[in-house]
Image (cartoon, grey):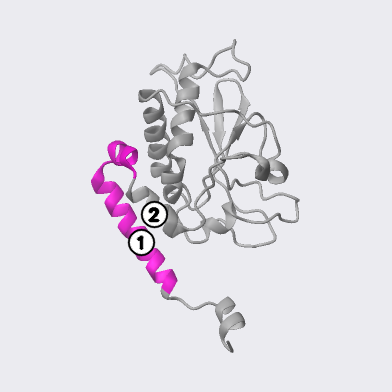
């Protein structure tokens, strides 16, 4: 469960991403001359992630509860350790994407409910879109996103709930190209059924706040 307790950090399922040759000897993401140790191909791949991640959020964060993790207030540790905006930085755990070392980057969006096969397919589909279209990931942000993120103008925010995320996935041309119409339509139908079931349920919060309105 991504966020079982509101006052504690949630359960993530991070992915460390790099591309290698078929023999596993050459890392195509590595470049010793770059400040962060990443190649041009790696930045294009990352650009594809940054461009498509809103449309991927329903796959990476597939439950109603998922959005209580990525849009959570600070916890007892002083941070949520999960993102709510589309940003990347160096060895900085307050960003959606962290570059911890040369030749790889870490995606910190996904949670413990994610399907591991769709996780890998989504990353690869978005990354290949970035390479094909030579996408620019934008400027690296060397700030604490929890304390200074609100100061960044034009920063894309992640969807606030599962319904918004599903609708973005449904309209995604790049995901449909990468994963196929049949899979995207079937996945979105399944998730929409879950959202409708949730919407029909009546929780304690509603009784506490509206029973006597």
Q: Residue furthest left?
A: 182
Is the residue under label 1 in contact with that under label 2 (CB below 8 Å)? yes
The question of residue 192 being in magenta is answered with yes
The question of residue 25 being in magenta is answered with no
In the image, is 192 to the left or to the right of 208?
left
Q: Which mark is residue 192?
A: 1
| Relative height, residue 38 to residue 47 (above, below) | above
Quadrant that contains the C terminus:
bottom right
Query: Residue 7: percent from the left, percent from the top?
Result: 70, 61
| Relative height, residue 196 to residue 91 (above, below) | below
Q: Which residue: 58% across, 28% down?
A: 139
**Viewer-side residue, 150 vs 144:** 150
Spatial CA span between label 2 and label 1: 7 Å
**Viewer-side residue, 27 vs 166:** 166
Q: Residue furthest front?
A: 153
Q: Which residues are magenta?
A: 172-199
Query: Residue 6: percent from the left, percent from the top?
Result: 65, 62
* Residue 1 can be seen, yes or no: no
Query: Residue 62: percent from the left, percent from the top?
Result: 45, 54
The residue tagged 2 is 166
Under circle 1, the secondary element is helix
If you read the primary sequence from the N terminus, does the residue marked by circle 2 or circle 1 appear first? 2
Q: Which residue: 46% across, 45% down?
A: 54
Predominant secondary structure, magenta span: helix
Q: Which mark is residue 56?
A: none
Q: Which residue: 37% across, 59% down?
A: 191
Query: Residue 183: percent from the left, percent from the top?
Result: 28, 47
Query: How many residues crowd around disc 1 within 10 Å: few (fewer than 14), some, or many (20 or more)?
Result: some
Under circle 2, the secondary element is helix
| Relative height, residue 209 to residue 110 (above, below) | below
């Amino acid at each position: 469960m991504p966020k079982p307790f509101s006052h504690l950090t949630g359960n993530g399922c991070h992915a460390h991403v790099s591309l290698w040759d078929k023999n596993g000897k050459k890392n195509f993401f590595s470049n010793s001359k770059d400040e962060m140790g990443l190649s041009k191909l790696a930045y294009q791949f990352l650009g594809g992630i940054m461009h498509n991640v809103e449309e991927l959020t329903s796959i990476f964060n597939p439950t109603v509860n998922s959005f209580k993790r990525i849009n959570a207030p600070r916890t007892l540790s002083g941070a949520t350790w999960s993102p709510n905006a589309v940003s990347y930085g160096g060895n900085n755990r307050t960003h959606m994407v962290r570059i911890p070392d040369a030749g790889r980057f870490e995606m910190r969006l996904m949670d413990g409910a994610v399907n591991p096969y769709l996780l890998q397919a989504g990353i690869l589909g978005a990354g290949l879109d970035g390479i094909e279209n030579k996408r620019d990931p934008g400027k690296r942000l060397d700030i604490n996103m929890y304390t200074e993120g609100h100061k960044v103008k034009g920063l894309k925010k992640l969807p606030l709930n599962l319904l918004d995320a599903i609708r973005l996935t449904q309209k995604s041309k790049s995901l449909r190209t990468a994963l196929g119409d049949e899979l995207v339509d079937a996945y979105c139908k399944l998730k929409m059924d879950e959202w409708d079931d949730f919407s029909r349920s009546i929780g304690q919060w509603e009784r506490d706040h509206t029973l006597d309105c």
